[in-house]
Image (cartoon, coloured by chain):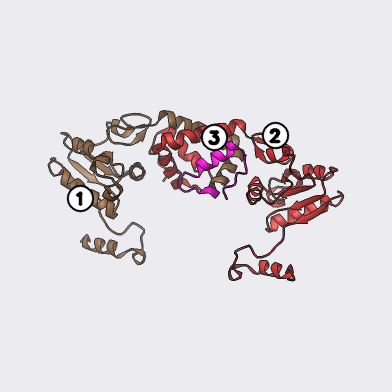
Chain colours: A brown, B red
Amino acid sequence: MSRKVAGPEIEQLIQLLARLPGLGPRSARRAALHLINKKDQLLAPLAAAMAAARDKILICEICGNVDTSNPCTICADPRRDPALICVVEEVADLWALERAGVIKGRYHVLGGTLSPLDGVGPDELNIAGLIERARGEQVKEILLALNATVEGQSTAHYLMDQLESCDVTVSQLAHGVPVGGELDYLDEGTLAAAIKARKTL
Amino acid sequence: MSRKVAGPEIEQLIQLLARLPGLGPRSARRAALHLINKKDQLLAPLAAAMAAARDKILICEICGNVDTSNPCTICADPRRDPALICVVEEVADLWALERAGVIKGRYHVLGGTLSPLDGVGPDELNIAGLIERARGEQVKEILLALNATVEGQSTAHYLMDQLESCDVTVSQLAHGVPVGGELDYLDEGTLAAAIKARKTL
């Protein structure tokens, strides 16, 4: 499977494409051929878009978001509520919440979860920056929007401890039945959480 | 899902990535973030590889292969047997045969299969070039290595008719049980073909 069949430029393209999440060696070859077949419509614009991203994308020094400005568009937006900071693991989570359009405040990207076995301690995550922001006068609430996984929840517990000394309310996303979800397909943990947090109508 | 959450450069990158085969809108976002997170290791090299591909890749005017030279490396290789031309639908098929290392001759890429309903007639495929090559003095055999699909096989029949006037042997790939294949998982057509073409030991 690893025999070289095309010139070095094409092989290089295939090998780099294969490192994208969701693409393997076989689909990277298909993608490379697709790019070559659509040179003007896709390959050239994508090469330009990647060069633009390489040259222009910055990490926001306030929240850790990626954007073409620093501070990022969200941190710089005066219409955002300065009282709320929503803490997420990754930029992808920030994007998911922005697509839902449900956060009126700003964000804080940790850059992962605590994982002592993988050598990820508090210093590897953007936690010091969060504590500093939480001490800010305008901040009233820190919403921990971490994944409902063991790693996400243990990181949330650690953050709760750290934030105790700050004068802020710490909140967390609700657990329950996803909208459109069928009970039959849900795990017992979710069902238990949904029943525990049931609402009186 | 289509709400814009990142700057125009990132959105442009995501939209172009989503047009690659194997990636959808969601995996394109993941791929874009992965690229941004690995700016120096992946994004910059990939942008350079794409720019190199855009600038250097050519279509071989003899066989239709893609390469950085025209004629391509295979057509220009004097060690290739000039008596055999292996006809394939797409460059991906040529690559698959090259990885297997089983073709001693050269190739001819049709660029697809005949499909009158989709407006693909003989003029849309690289058939005239094949007939011209088949009339060449050195060519003795045309091996039709088209997919074992209805479209591939009807295109093969059409090519057989067209090649009748040329002084060449026309051959086709054998049907049968794939190496490592289990009978239980094979369709009846394959089993019937394998039995029909059985070999006496």
Q: Which residue was labeled with disc 3?
A: B50
Q: Which amino acid type is shown beneath numbered disc 2?
A: Asn
B44 horizontally vs B76: left or right: left
- State which chain disc 2 sits on: B
Which of the two discs, 2 and 1, sits closer to the camera? 2
Task: Determine if marks 2 and 3 fall on one subunit.
Answer: yes
- Quadrant hosting residue B175: bottom right
Disc 2 residue crowd, few under 14, some 14–19, many 20+, Cα 10 Å: some
- Quadrant hosting residue B58: top right
Q: Which residue was labeled with disc 1?
A: A157
Q: Give the alpha-carbon distance from disc 2 to disc 1, as whole Å.
A: 63 Å
- State which chain disc 3 sits on: B
Q: Give the alpha-carbon distance from disc 2 to disc 3, as whole Å.
A: 19 Å
Q: From the top left corner, tell me how far across and down residue B31 is, in percent.
A: 44, 43
Residue depicted at x 21% and y 43%: A142
Q: Which amino acid type is shown beneath numbered disc 1?
A: His
Q: Give the alpha-carbon distance from disc 1 to disc 3, as whole Å.
A: 45 Å
Q: Which residue was labeled with disc 2?
A: B70
Q: Which amino acid type is shown beneath numbered disc 3?
A: Met
Residue depicted at x 37% and y 33%: A67
Does the residue at mark 2 contact the one at mark 3 (Cβ under 8 Å)?
no
Q: Nearer the viewer, residue A114 or B110?
A: A114
* Element carrying mark 1: helix
* Element carrying mark 3: helix
Q: Nearer the viewer, residue A11 or B193?
A: A11
Magenta stretch in the rendered image: A1-26
* Element carrying mark 2: loop
Is A185 situated above or below A37? Answer: below
- State which chain disc 1 sits on: A
Q: From the top left corner, tell me how far across and down residue A28 is, in percent.
A: 54, 45
Residue depicted at x 70% and y 34%: B70
